[in-house]
Amino acid sequence: EVPLSESGGDLVQPGGSLRLSCTASGFTFRNYGMNWVRQVPGKGLEWVSGISGSGATTDYADSVKGRFTISRDNSKNTLFLQMNDLRVEDTAVYYCAKDRGLWIQLWFFDNWGQGTQVTVSS
Amino acid sequence: EIVLTQSPGTLSLSPGQSATLSCRASQYVTNNWLAWYQHRPGQPPRLLIYGASSGATGIPDRFSGSGSGTDFTLTISRVEPEDFAVYYCQQYVSSPYTFGQGTKLEL
């Protein structure tokens, strides 16, 4: 297990913005794709977004496309999720998750952070 | 989008019994690119199985995966008290990388 630690979750009004961060240690961060996965209260897991090790390639679930932006700073071993135009249905625990593949994204996840709570409510 | 349907929704067992969890895909899962995760309350999900049948690092051998095509199974041969959790399957064939709705293994 490698430590992943999320931060930035908060209570925000609909239409608002939030930026999540995930700091990593214990592995060569730039060599691995990273992802955000969320869990809506009482429901299952939903993949939200992923980014390649270099940051050149990104992908998004349709539910967040155009509103969320994933990015990373490999010099600081940190992953980000910029969340704009937030909706009530974005309320969830957001996990950062490390891709299993070395230098290549396999799109399944072998290490997860503890999660950060995002609540969108007026 | 590949939809994954897990059954049963809840499985009630006692320690020492065997558990069989099912995951059915709406489309063929190429190369058996299917993973299983365990999710205990208050903890992050934990990778158990990938490639439908390969055990992740450190996973006890009582956990095994099988199946191909559209039908996959996670088997826990002798359930231990720490195994009571929610289990999810996930396909990584194509985006969006979807999860099943989960099977809750309860005491």
Image (cartoon, grey):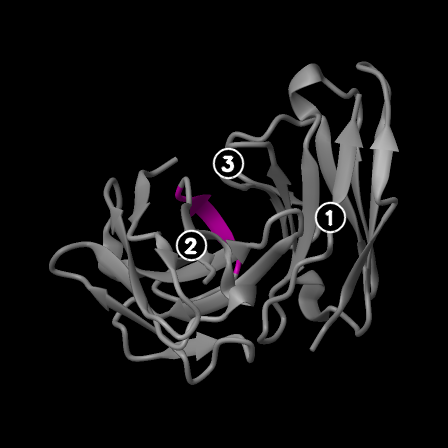
Q: Which residue is mark 2?
A: A118
Judged by depth in the image, the label closer to the viewer, 2 or 1, is 2
How would you rate the neighbour count of disc 3 (Cα within 10 Å): few for under 14, some for 14-19, many for 20 or more? few
Circle number at residue B102: 1
Q: Is residue B82 above or below residue A25?
A: above
Residue at horizontal 72%, vertical 73%?
A: B2
Residue at horizontal 54%, vertical 41%?
A: B45
Q: Assign a secondary structure to mark 2.
A: strand
Q: CA distance from mark 2 to mark 1?
A: 22 Å
Q: CA distance from mark 3 to mark 1?
A: 22 Å
Three-letter amino acid code at the position of disc 2:
Val
User: Where is residue B24, by image quadrant?
Assistant: bottom right
Chain identifier of the residue bearing label 3 in the image: B
Three-letter amino acid code at the position of disc 1:
Gly
Instruction: Say if labels 3 and 1 share a chain.
Output: yes
Residue interval drawn in magenta:
A108-113
Chain identifier of the residue bearing label 1 in the image: B
Q: Is residue A109 magenta?
A: yes
Q: Is residue A71 left or right of residue B82?
A: left
Q: Is residue B99 above or below residue B84?
A: below
Q: Which residue is mark 3?
A: B57
Magenta residues: mostly which secondary structure?
Answer: strand
Q: Is residue A118 visible?
A: yes
Residue at horizontal 80%, vertical 74%?
A: B27
Q: Assign a secondary structure to mark 1.
A: loop
Q: Is residue A24 above or below residue B43?
A: below
Q: Is residue B5 magenta?
A: no
Residue farthest toward the front in the current orientation of the protein: A122
Q: Assign a secondary structure to mark 3.
A: loop
How would you rate the neighbour count of disc 2 (Cα within 10 Å): few for under 14, some for 14-19, many for 20 or more? many
Q: Is residue B35 left or right of residue B16?
A: left
Image spot of residue A22 (x, y percent): 29, 52
